[in-house]
Amino acid sequence: MYYPSQKKPSRRLYTFPGGLHLPENKAQSTTTATVKAALPRKLILPIQQHIGAPAQVLVKVGERVLKGAMIANPQGRISASVHAPSSGIVSEISEHPVAHPSGLPALCIVIETDGEDEWGELPPAIDDFRLCEPGLLLERIRTSGIVGLGGASFPTNIKLEPKKERRIDTLVINAAECEPFITCDDMLMRDRPQEILEGITIMKHLVGAASCLIGIEDNKPEAIAAMTKVISEQEVDNIELVVIPTLYPSGGERQLIRVLTGKEVPSGKLPASIGIVCNNVGTAAAVADAVLRGRPLISRYITVTGEGVANPRNLEALIGTSGSELIEQAGGYTGEAARLIMGGPMMGFTLHTDKVPIVKASNCLLAASTREAPDPGLATACIRCGKCAEVCPVSLLPQQMYWYARAKDLEKTQEYNLFDCIECGCCSHVCPAHIPLVQYFRFAKNECWDQEREKKSAELARMRHEAKLARLARLEAEKIARAQKKKAALARSASTNKGSDAAGDPKKAAIEAALKRAAEKKARLAEEGVKPQNTDNLTDAQRRQVQQADARRKALGDGDTRQASEQQDR
Ligand code: SF4
Ligand code: SF4
């Protein structure tokens, strides 16, 4: 279906299996304009708000930080940075309760805001992004902390850098927002269509896609009008707004791709494997802010709604603002609040306290009444009605997966494509036995990941042990080689000295040395003038004296030789 204001004729749309028509409950939060939430006194920022490795803390307690300053650095390839949403003092770096289905606390940086909201130095705007190196654009997106704002919170720079061997034909922009109650994307499109279009243009340029399809459900006429207007005014090439029928969960990535292109993302593969990259409208606006204005991701639109709050609305809140403060700004609780949900009624999870900060992935805070989120009651035995399989948008067999997940037969659950389950909740919603099927699937997935982690760490330990053994063997071999080399050198030296008479006989060598010394002494004395005398003209007495002196000199030479010989004997 095409919205009537579009210039182009309708393109063919496809369907996905299953799905549900649910009460929308969207109007209650779209009647009031979106405003900026008040600056909170305290901001609590988890260092992991994304898929991948937690960010590394860059600040110390007591340090003053300015708005927009990076306070945690991405670690590794798949990670995202965290920035200070306002100026203030870092008062704590410790564990805090966070919005997570596990209910476990997480490491957070706490900033006591100073009320000045003073911006720090921002990186320069990249006005003509087409002339910029793609690597620099991706780095800007990475250092701006941008992750998928549709709920998945996968680092956007990774998504926009598909493998070189894969050609991307189509950029799909997810504007479907199919889950009941949630309207933050709808309001963002009404308020900031220009920024969204700028971000789309940058992303399209980065992935090298020939065309872009923006998929939007037909229950958002104001957003459709705003987007249509900006697209037609800008005369952008090959960016098309496609209005699709409202059917839950058409906003699922694979479902939207199917509806818009008719293509099926293969099981266990990413959309890039079929030449498609998919991003959310909120992410597009964040990319434009980062590239064209140098602004990191420090705030987002969030829907605060349900019969449990007095004035349901959308707020632009700083990341790290407490849920309780947002509830206050939506008029506070009414007497009907029965359950507080982070996210929508289908894919969200129950919060046990409102004193948790909103993070990059937080799109909705639903204070639901018992009418809006009824207690499902006690689960009973499966009656094998098959309704769960009928509504599954991925054509899975939830009933079988449930049996195996319950029996903790993880191998079997994977044989039934557990990891293709998008946790949309359609099966649980229709189950007449009120079996919390999605909870079983989430549990089974977590168990599989735990097993995988254990397997990896055992493999790592084995590799480390083998490396240690190999190192020891190498050291031993080197030691033996050194000893052999030394022995060979000695043998070579012995064979070189073989020519000398004294070689191998130290006593003989010492005698030879003494004789040499005596000869040298004799030569020295001769040089000094003690020359042999002509005895022909001497008297007998004088001749005897000369003969005695010669005899003494001779005896002195013999004595030297004897002394050397005795020393050697000792
Ligand atoms: S819908 Fe519920 S009762 Fe029916 S087959 Fe599925 S799990 Fe069983
Ligand atoms: S939660 Fe999973 S199994 Fe259930 S309907 Fe959705 S995709 Fe299918």
Image (cartoon, rainbow, N blue to C red):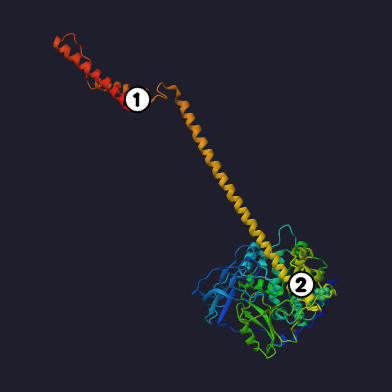
Residue 374, percent from left and from top: 75, 84
Q: Is mark 2 within 8 Å of ligand 2?
A: no
Q: Which residue position holds label 1?
A: 510
519 shown above or below 434? above
Q: Which residue position holds label 2?
A: 252
Q: Residue at x 78, y 74 (%)?
A: 215
Residue 119, percent from left and from top: 55, 76
Looking at the image, is mark 1 or mark 2 earlier in the sequence?
A: 2
Residue 246, percent from left and from top: 81, 78
451 shown above or below 241? above
Residue farthest toward the top in the current orientation of the protein: 536
Q: Nearer the viewer, residue 460 or 144?
A: 460
Residue 134, percent from left and from top: 66, 63
Which quadrant does ligand 2 occupy? Answer: bottom right
Which of the numbered marks, if any, corresponds to residue 281? Answer: none
The image quadrant that residue 83 belongs to is bottom right
114 shown above or below 475? below
- For mark 2, does the 10 Å Cα neighbourhood hold few (<14), some (14 to 19), or many (20 or more) residues? many
Is residue 428 in view from this perspective?
yes
**In what element is the residue under mark 2?**
loop
